[in-house]
Image (cartoon, rainbow, N blue to C red):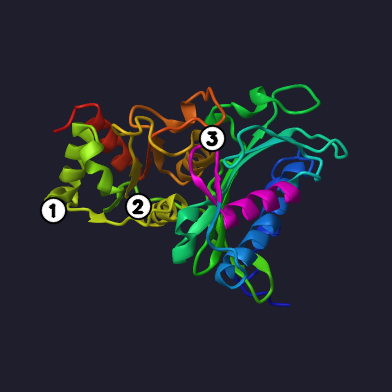
């Protein structure tokens, strides 16, 4: 029988199949890590169901509550946070979780077994855009525990990004996408609602070495360090030899802006300023997982001085500036911020 050659999408490379095939390449794998990713994909579908009909089911607007990082909690923030926790608390593979929306660690309920992995997540990134129907997403990061047994502790959570064993994000937009990496490339899957499965749509994503798009909130320009101001002005100047001027694209949703940067190249910046010296983004819930994915795709991520993944976190909700995208663009940004370019 002749079996024609097919593309990954045509042969129905689902997210679950891709995870299982990755597991087979590790002879010592137990299937626990694969189960975690499967559980996260299910939680994402549940969140997407509510996001996609938010205006119809009274899920828009604020809860009037402010979270630990000072952001007003949206109704969908609360729903997404609870949904991800409940989808993952009973699987038996986690010893502890931590969420951007909660001040303290999220322990596994006593009636469920404790496992060897740690999950950190931003349940709904970009939620301030929800009421305007703009792209939002969920971001997650997975570590192996460092303590021996029992409930997970801060020691298990406060690990530098280099020790991540997996990370990903889910994009809730015109279509729903699940992008993840275990350090061996970054892969994207798009939900086919007709069959309810994530199908491989972006295999082994490679970010261009240099792009032509910059993404930054220029409303903060007057609060930036002069070196940062000079860098953005440089990107706007005409110079065909260096590919300038760059085009400006800024959604105001981190996960959406970084996703575009991952596919098209360029750089996303959230620098510190006089009001927020460390920026506004959270190292553990946003910067680390996105840096892990972008580096796996051949890009780079920096806090303006050094590699994001090498930062040793000191607190659960630590903030950090972020410069992420094409390797050459991130390197150039570091040079400007260090005063080596004018």
For label 3, the residue is: 284
Q: Mark on residue 256?
A: none
The x and y percentages for residue 35 are 75, 48
182 part of magenta stretch: no
> What segment is highlighted magenta in the picture?
64-87
Gap between marks 2 and 3, in whole Å? 24 Å
For label 1, the residue is: 240
Label 1 sits on a secondary structure element that is helix
Badge 2 density bin: few <14, some 14–19, many ≥20, Cα 10 Å: many
Q: Residue at x 47, y 61 (%)?
A: 135
The x and y percentages for residue 152 are 73, 28
The x and y percentages for residue 117 are 71, 35
Q: Residue at x 69, y 74 (%)?
A: 195
Instruction: Give the mark toward the camera: 2 or 3.
Output: 3
Q: Earlier in the sequence, mark 2 or mark 3?
A: 2
Gap between marks 1 and 3, in whole Å? 38 Å
Q: Are marks 2 and 1 in contact (CB under 8 Å)?
A: no
For label 2, the residue is: 265
């Amino acid at each position: 029988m002749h079996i024609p050659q097919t593309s990954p999408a045509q042969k129905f490379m689902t997210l679950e199949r891709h995870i299982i095939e990755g597991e087979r390449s590790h002879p010592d794998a137990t299937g626990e890590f694969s189960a975690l990713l499967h559980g996260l994909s299910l939680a994402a579908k549940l969140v997407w169901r509510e996001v996609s009909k938010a205006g119809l089911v009274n899920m828009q607007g604020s809860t009037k509550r402010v979270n630990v990082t000072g952001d007003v909690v949206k109704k969908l923030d609360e729903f997404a946070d609870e949904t991800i926790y409940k989808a993952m608390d009973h699987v038996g593979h986690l010893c502890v979780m931590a969420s951007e929306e909660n001040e303290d660690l999220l322990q596994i309920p006593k009636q469920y077994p404790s496992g060897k992995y740690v999950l950190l997540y931003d349940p709904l990134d970009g939620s301030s855009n929800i009421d305007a129907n703009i792209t939002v997403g969920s971001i997650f990061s997975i570590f192996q525990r460092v303590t021996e047994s029992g409930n997970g502790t801060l020691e298990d959570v406060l690990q530098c990004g280099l020790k991540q064993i997996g990370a990903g994000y889910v994009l809730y937009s015109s279509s729903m996408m699940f992008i993840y990496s275990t350090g061996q490339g970054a892969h994207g899957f798009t939900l086919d609602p007709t069959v309810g499965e994530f199908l491989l749509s972006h295999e082994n994503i490679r970010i261009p070495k240099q792009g032509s798009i910059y993404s930054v909130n220029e409303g903060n320009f007057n609060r930036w360090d002069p070196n940062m101001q000079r860098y953005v002005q440089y990107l706007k100047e005409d110079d065909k030899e260096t590919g300038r001027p760059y085009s400006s694209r800024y959604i105001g949703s981190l996960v959406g802006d970084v996703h575009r940067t991952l596919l098209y190249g360029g750089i996303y910046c959230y620098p510190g300023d006089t009001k927020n010296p460390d920026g506004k983004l959270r190292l553990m819930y946003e910067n680390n997982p996105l840096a892990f994915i972008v580096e796996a795709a051949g890009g780079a991520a920096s806090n303006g001085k050094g590699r994001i993944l090498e930062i040793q976190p000191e607190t659960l909700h630590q903030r950090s500036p972020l410069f992420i995208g094409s390797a050459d663009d991130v390197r150039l940004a570091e040079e400007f911020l260090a005063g080596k370019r004018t």
